Amino acid sequence: MKWQNLVQSGGEAKIRIQGGEVMVNGCVETRRGRQLVTGDQVTFNGKNYEVNL
Protein backbone atom coordinates (compact mmCIF):
# COMPACT_ATOMS: atom_id res chain seq x y z
CA MET A 1 0.00 0.00 0.00
CA LYS A 2 2.95 2.26 0.57
CA TRP A 3 4.07 1.58 -3.03
CA GLN A 4 1.00 3.49 -4.26
CA ASN A 5 1.03 6.07 -1.43
CA LEU A 6 -2.35 4.81 -0.21
CA VAL A 7 -1.27 5.06 3.43
CA GLN A 8 1.04 7.45 5.23
CA SER A 9 3.05 4.87 7.18
CA GLY A 10 3.80 1.20 7.61
CA GLY A 11 1.90 1.32 10.90
CA GLU A 12 -1.24 2.51 9.16
CA ALA A 13 -0.83 -0.21 6.52
CA LYS A 14 -0.51 -2.84 9.27
CA ILE A 15 -3.74 -1.72 10.94
CA ARG A 16 -5.69 -1.67 7.68
CA ILE A 17 -4.36 -5.05 6.56
CA GLN A 18 -5.07 -6.72 9.89
CA GLY A 19 -8.52 -5.11 9.87
CA GLY A 20 -9.40 -6.93 6.65
CA GLU A 21 -9.56 -3.78 4.51
CA VAL A 22 -7.22 -5.10 1.80
CA MET A 23 -7.89 -7.74 -0.84
CA VAL A 24 -5.30 -9.39 -3.07
CA ASN A 25 -6.56 -11.22 -6.15
CA GLY A 26 -10.11 -11.16 -4.78
CA CYS A 27 -9.32 -12.59 -1.33
CA VAL A 28 -9.04 -10.69 1.95
CA GLU A 29 -5.36 -10.48 2.89
CA THR A 30 -4.39 -10.18 6.56
CA ARG A 31 -0.68 -11.07 6.29
CA ARG A 32 1.38 -7.93 6.62
CA GLY A 33 4.51 -9.12 4.82
CA ARG A 34 2.88 -10.81 1.83
CA GLN A 35 5.05 -10.72 -1.26
CA LEU A 36 3.27 -9.24 -4.26
CA VAL A 37 4.19 -10.21 -7.80
CA THR A 38 3.60 -8.55 -11.15
CA GLY A 39 -0.04 -8.95 -12.15
CA ASP A 40 -1.46 -9.19 -8.62
CA GLN A 41 -4.66 -7.21 -8.17
CA VAL A 42 -4.88 -5.24 -4.92
CA THR A 43 -8.21 -3.75 -3.82
CA PHE A 44 -8.28 -1.04 -1.15
CA ASN A 45 -10.98 1.53 -0.40
CA GLY A 46 -13.06 0.23 -3.30
CA LYS A 47 -10.33 0.83 -5.89
CA ASN A 48 -8.29 -1.75 -7.77
CA TYR A 49 -4.56 -1.51 -8.34
CA GLU A 50 -2.42 -3.81 -10.49
CA VAL A 51 1.10 -4.59 -9.35
CA ASN A 52 3.73 -3.80 -11.99
CA LEU A 53 7.15 -4.60 -10.54
Image: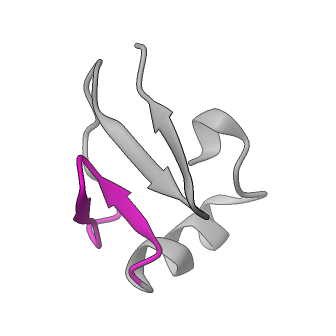
**Left/right of residue 34 with respect to residue 12 in the rendered view:** left
Number of numbered discs overlaid on the protein picture: 0
Which scheme is used to colour this image of the protein?
A: one colour
Q: Is residue 44 magenta?
A: no
Which sits in the foreground, 15 or 29?
29
Location of residue 39 in the rendering, given as x and y in whole percent from the top left corner: 28, 21
Location of residue 2 in the rendering, given as x and y in whole percent from the top left corner: 62, 44
Q: Main secondary structure of the magenta part?
A: loop
Location of residue 6 in the rendering, given as x and y in whole percent from the top left corner: 70, 50
Q: Relative to 36, does residue 30 appear above or below in the rendering?
A: below
Q: Quadrant of residue 7?
A: bottom right
Q: Relative to 51, does residue 20 appear above or below in the rendering?
A: below
Q: Relative to 7, does residue 52 appear above or below in the rendering?
A: above
**Residue at (40, 13) in percent of width and height:** 53
Q: Is residue 25 magenta?
A: yes
Q: Magenta part of the protein: which range?
A: 20-32
**Left/right of residue 1 with respect to residue 37 in the rendered view:** right
**Residue at (29, 73) in percent of width and height:** 30
In the picture as drawn, the residue positioned furthest to the top comes out as 53
In the picture as drawn, the residue positioned furthest to the bottom comes out as 19
**Left/right of residue 11 with respect to residue 40 in the rendered view:** right
In the picture as drawn, the residue positioned furthest to the right comes out as 8
Which sits in the foreground, 52 or 12?
52
Which sits in the foreground, 42 or 3?
42
**Residue at (26, 50) in percent of width and height:** 34
**Residue at (28, 32) in percent of width and height:** 40
Location of residue 12 in the rendering, given as x and y in whole percent from the top left corner: 65, 71
